[in-house]
Image: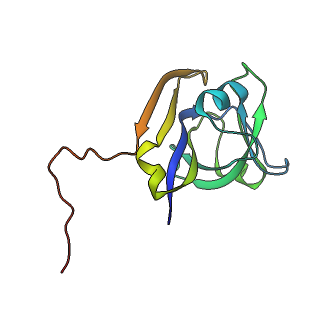
Amino acid sequence: MLRKLLLSKIHRAKITQRDPDYIGSITICEDLLIQSGLRPNEAVLVLDIDNAARFETYVIRGEPRSGTIGINGAAAKLVEIGHRVIILGFSYLAENEVDNHVANVVVCNEDNCAVQHLQYPSQINQTTGHKLATTH
């Protein structure tokens, strides 16, 4: 069995450009790709904080130090420049890989620079004393 877990997240990035005539994708500044662990051509889910739009697309590398977050193709009609978005990348992990998995999260400022790096472990703390319900 494989589980789908969060791999990388860019939180509160600001859309700097939109181009409905471009052939699909989201352009992300190379610095944010490196810091988040996202890769060019990787599928991502994009969530618009300002209007609740959600769409899936793939990553294109933007110029380093540009702060670019560009929504291209048909999805550009779902967003506006200045909107804040959350960009999520996922990974499929085998059950025996889950406890060692840690998601990488980058929080952006107004200029789409990383101001905070967070890590979200996937392991459940087994020492809390909570037990899973069982059915008989």
Of residues 82 and 22, the one nearer the viewer is: 22
| Residue 92 % position (x, y) | 56, 56
- Which residue is farthest front? 96
Q: Residue at x 44, y 50 (%)?
A: 98
Question: Quick one: 80 or 14, which is closer to the camera?
Answer: 14
- In screen coordinates, is 14 left or right of 133? right
Q: Is residue 36 positioned above or below 135 on the image?
A: above
Q: Residue at the left extreme? A: 129
Display coloring:
rainbow
Q: Which of the pair 22/79 is nearer the observer?
A: 22
71 to the left or right of 90: right
Q: In which quadrant will I find the C terminus?
A: bottom left
In front of the other: 66 or 32: 32
| Residue at x 79%, y 25% (from the top left corner) | 63
Please state the horizontal and vertical placement of residue 68, each as a whole percent of the image: 71, 29
- Residue 2, compared with residue 66, is above or below; it is below
| Location of residue 133 (image quadrant) | bottom left
Q: Position of residue 80 (x, y in %)?
A: 65, 41
Q: Residue furthest bottom?
A: 136
Name the residue rendered at 65%, 52% in the picture. Answer: 78
State the image quarter where residue 88 is shown: top right
Does 6 appear above or below 38? below
Q: Position of residue 4 (x, y in %)?
A: 51, 57
Q: Residue at x 48, y 50 (%)?
A: 97
